[in-house]
Image (cartoon, helix red, strand yellow):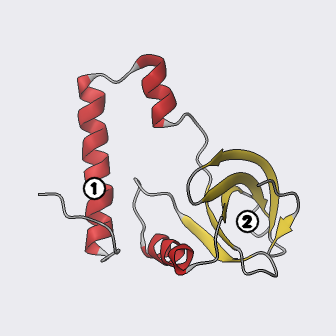
């Protein structure tokens, strides 16, 4: 899936930066703020896409990407999710390149636990309590 254009008269879609089971992610320019954003074009128009957007909109935590907007972008009801754009290397790429020290792994585990704790506290479906 490639996309070239503007979504919701707000997001000027640029380069493709990733993809996964749920959709394709593009770097985009947010006309409203002047900032870069990540726009995920979701592969289906089902309720899972709406749940993902609603869950992200509830969360505010330094370990969780920030919600910007969500909606439909086509006449077929295909959905998009706009999020804070984080520039840098994925954890998988970092791990493949140099691995992680024990200290880095512990720090990462603490950050992940904090993010999961926030999701659990906000009652996001699918978030599991770590005990």
Q: Is residue 12 left or right of residue 22?
A: right
Disc 1 element: helix
Q: Residue at x 57, y 60 (%)?
A: 22
Q: Position of residue 119 (x, y in %)?
A: 33, 67
Q: Nearer the viewer, mark 2 or mark 1?
A: 1
Q: Is residue 51 left or right of residue 119?
A: right
The front one of 68 and 13 is 13
Residue that numbered label 1 is attached to = 114
Q: Quadrant of the N terminus?
A: bottom right
Labels 2 and 1 touching (C-beta < 8 A): no
* Position above or below: 90 against 66: above
The front one of 33 and 109 is 109
Q: Position of residue 28 (x, y in %)?
A: 76, 56
Residue that numbered label 2 is attached to = 33
Q: Position of residue 111 (x, y in %)?
A: 31, 47
* Position above or below: 10 against 15: below
Q: Position of residue 47 (x, y in %)?
A: 53, 81
Query: Which quarter of the figure has residue 81?
Result: bottom right
Q: Is residue 77 left or right of residue 20?
A: right
Q: Residue furthest right?
A: 5
Q: Residue at x 47, y 27 (%)?
A: 94
Query: Which quarter of the figure has residue 107?
Result: top left
Q: Residue at x 39, y 61 (%)?
A: 61
């Amino acid at each position: 899936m490639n996309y070239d254009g503007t979504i919701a008269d707000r997001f000027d879609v640029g380069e493709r930066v990733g993809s996964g089971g749920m959709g394709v992610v593009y770097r985009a320019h947010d006309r409203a703020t002047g900032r870069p954003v990540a726009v995920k074009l979701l592969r289906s128009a089902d309720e899972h896409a709406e749940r993902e957007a609603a869950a992200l909109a509830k969360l505010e935590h330094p370990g969780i990407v920030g919600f910007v907007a969500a909606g439909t972008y086509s006449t077929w009801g295909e959905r998009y999710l706009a999020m804070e754009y984080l520039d840098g290397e994925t954890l998988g790429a970092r791990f493949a390149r140099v691995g992680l020290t024990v200290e880095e792994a512990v720090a990462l585990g603490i950050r992940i636990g904090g993010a999961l704790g926030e999701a659990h506290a906000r009652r996001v479906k699918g978030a599991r309590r770590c005990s």
